[in-house]
Amino acid sequence: MALQPVAKLPFEGLIADARSHKLGKWHSKLSERALEQYAEIGWPGPKTESWKYTSLNKIASGTFSLAREYSAIVPEDMIMPLTCPRLVLVNGVLNKELSNLEQLIGNLSITSLVDIEDHQKTFFDDLFKSEESKGDLPLTYLNTAILSDAVMLEITEGSKCELPLHIISIGSGNGITFAPRLIVNVGIGAKVDFIESHVGCSDSVYFSNSVTQLYLGDNSEVGHYKLQNDSRDSSHISLTRAVIDDGASYDNFTMSVGAKLSRNEVRAHLKGSGVECCINGAYLGAADQHIDNTTFIEHQAEGSSSREVFKGVLDDTARGVFQGKILVHPEAQKTDGYQMNRAMLLSDKAEIDSKPELEIYADDVRCSHGATVGELEDELIFYLCARGIDRESARRMLIGAYISDAIDEVKNIDIRSSIQSVAENWLKQNLYEK
Amino acid sequence: MSISEETVDQVKKLEADKYKYGFVTDIEMETAPKGLNEDIIRFISEKKEEPQWMLEWRLKAYKHWLTMEEPNWAKVGYKKIDYQDLYYYAAPKSMDRPKSLDEVDPELLKTYEKLGIPLKEQELLSGVVAVDAVFDSVSVATTYKAKLTEMGVIFCSISEAVREYPELVKKYLGSVVPHSDNYFSALNCAVFTDGSFVYVPKGLRCPMELSTYFRINAENTGQFERTMIIADEGSYVSYLEGCTAPQRDENQLHAAVVELVALTNAEIKYSTVQNWYPGDETGAGGIYNFVTKRGACRGDNSKISWTQVETGSAVTWKYPSCILQGDNSIGEFYSVAITNNAQQADTGTKMIHLGKNTKSTIISKGISAGRADNTYRGLVKIMPKAEGARNFTQCDSLLIGNTCGAHTVPYIETRNPTARVEHEATTSKISEDQMFYCQQRGLSPEEAVSLIVNGFCKEVMKELPMEFAVEAQKLIGISLEGSVG
């Protein structure tokens, strides 16, 4: 990838190219509107508050072309180790051959962008209507402008999906960019767990700009788990946006271990009352990795609770960023908000920047946040050594336990243990056998 | 008499005039023409009989200010300030610097008496506080000067210091807050008219509290004072600052700069009770308080402690900070910020850890009532060389009513693995249980709120020197008046 001076509006040149996908009139109109929004906001720079700690200069000055290849071999050792129905996207486009959709049960429908139905189009419109700080979403508009495909999942009212659904997004190729887009509509009282694995084929270098939109109907129950294990020299920028209605419960967890530069942004809008929302995550960084976790929880109605636990371990010159904001509207009385972010630095060149933020306009609320940073405590190591455990094992035990603490937040037991094994593998490869 | 009863009494007394400092003193003033340009700066510098280097420094700051933009990242909204529609210099006419208190205009002395700072009495009685009083733009009187001079403490107005101790001023002025630091501090550098200057010599523990009272009196005047405190090796000083202004319909601008320097083993304790006129219930009038306060712990084992009780001002924009350069140096920030009616406060601190084993503590209590917005904004930065640095931060917010807002925006940047940084924040309201408990024991709702709020702020209040603590407790009651029931 040759470096060029930063263009005024990066990727603008690719947008016309993306329209050549011929996905119909509706699609080109959508793309035009998105371009307008993207152009209005512009590329986030160092002065954009929500991108203060994560610089996108390298992406902006890189040369990327739109991915044209939509088949690849699934890198089985990188994805979340689970046996369940899978849906595979290669460079952002649904690949039916790699997916085993036949296993999927009837109460779940999957539509690709070419077959999009009218009511599903409203999800795209929603994004343009949203009042929330538009300025924070330039890359979401860029995603919309260069879409090659989008996958819509609809879970019908009242249906309980026994098996989780594994969505695998593969990046394959060099110097390419793609925009995976996933839209999940969960009907009233429905229950579903799904996993996103973002991985890359070996030696691929790409920029994945991913967006997942969810709508949770009344009393629905959704587990949404994500593994970000993109190729080591790639960039992964993602937004998850969930709109949650009355009495629904949303359990989100992100495990970030891959990519050179990654940002995992989760925005949850608690529209209904009595919502239970968990946004948790763990991140492991070594070498020159940059891992950004940004969350925004908006309490719009009374009596909802939100919980956030993020933990990270950073070695070498890795840099971690955590930005978490809780906004409580005046109507959202009896809100209960909790947020905790902890990071462990293992090297003197590692860095962590946290910005937990509360913005509260209702008086009858309980909101708290906490953040801690520190190294592995000598006292704890001593405690274990005093009991006959050698120093290195003690260290491994403590680092492992530190990260499991966050992983324990995952409600689905099977998924929890597979996330656990991903973390253990990473620690083994990057820390213990380095 | 219990504190809460006292508060209620105080509030009753003030019913006719809620802001008791809202009077105007009719005194002949000398002002520079309205507006800001190089000539005004030359005029101020000439009035102050300043040396050439000082004027050049001011002009350099002014030129830089012209290239800057007013910051808009704080969570406050206010009418655009027309910097050309302000007087940048206003001084009581009658006096050149008085030789003794007897020469001070009696009107002025009366003003300070009304404010509860009887300068004259303090000279006579065996008080413990030395006061420098700043009226609009100039320092009018400093008490206890002789006694302090005898011990080697320099406590005077900054204009006097520029004339009498140019070497000291030249060495430290702008060394903590440079002329290019931020929009308001650059403006201050260009047009500052007075302020206090303190130098505590090596090894001396300053025997009395030093204090400055600031008063904005004239209309359409900006007050730009500059305070400098230098604590030489092994010394200690405790400094108090209080501020009031008359009640006016238009907004007034206050852009001050405070620089503290603590050398090896020195300690500075800086306490502020900020009670500028907050504007009326509808949000008309009030002071725009845009202040840059920063202390440098230059030497090893030095310590700087900021304590502030912020009850006044329509808009507050203030972040007293510590730069912990020396090894084992300590920075502290204790703050109570109360906003009621249409007040807005965006305040907090910055703790920059550079030296080894540096420690910082941040305790911030924000109370928001009426339609007010109260924001804590802070930065804790641990630099790569700050081995063993330690920070503890606690930010608590209390909301009274559902038309106000409380916000917390901390930034935590850590670049050293041995650092331990802890941050906690909570938001809550006064619970019905607490109110019921108090009222059941015969307290009125107003008394109960005052009691609970004082309890909520206790950790900060106990850091204040005694004379100030009593006043501050009363202020809290007054500021929250009308917020319940």
Image (cartoon, rainbow, N blue to C red):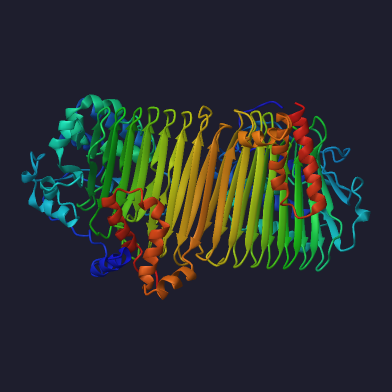
Q: Position of residue B377 (x, y in %)?
A: 46, 47
Is residue B105 rendered to the left or right of residue A284?
A: left
* Position above or below: A253 against A13: below
Residue sitting farthest toward the right: A102
Q: Quadrant of the C terminus of chain A?
A: top right
Residue A54 pos. (x, y %)? 60, 38
Q: Identify whether B218 is placed above or below A257.
A: below
Residue at the farthest front position:
A387
Name the one closer to the observer, B181 or A21.
B181
Whether residue A205 is visible: no
Residue A228 image offset from top left, x and y in percent: 75, 42
Residues A379 and A232: in front is A379
**What residue do we see at 81% from left, 68% from top?**
A158
User: Which x, y percent locates residue B20?
Assistant: 23, 61
Q: Is residue B299 above or below residue B21?
A: above
Work out whether residue B83 or residue B187 is closer to the camera in this orientation and state it: B187
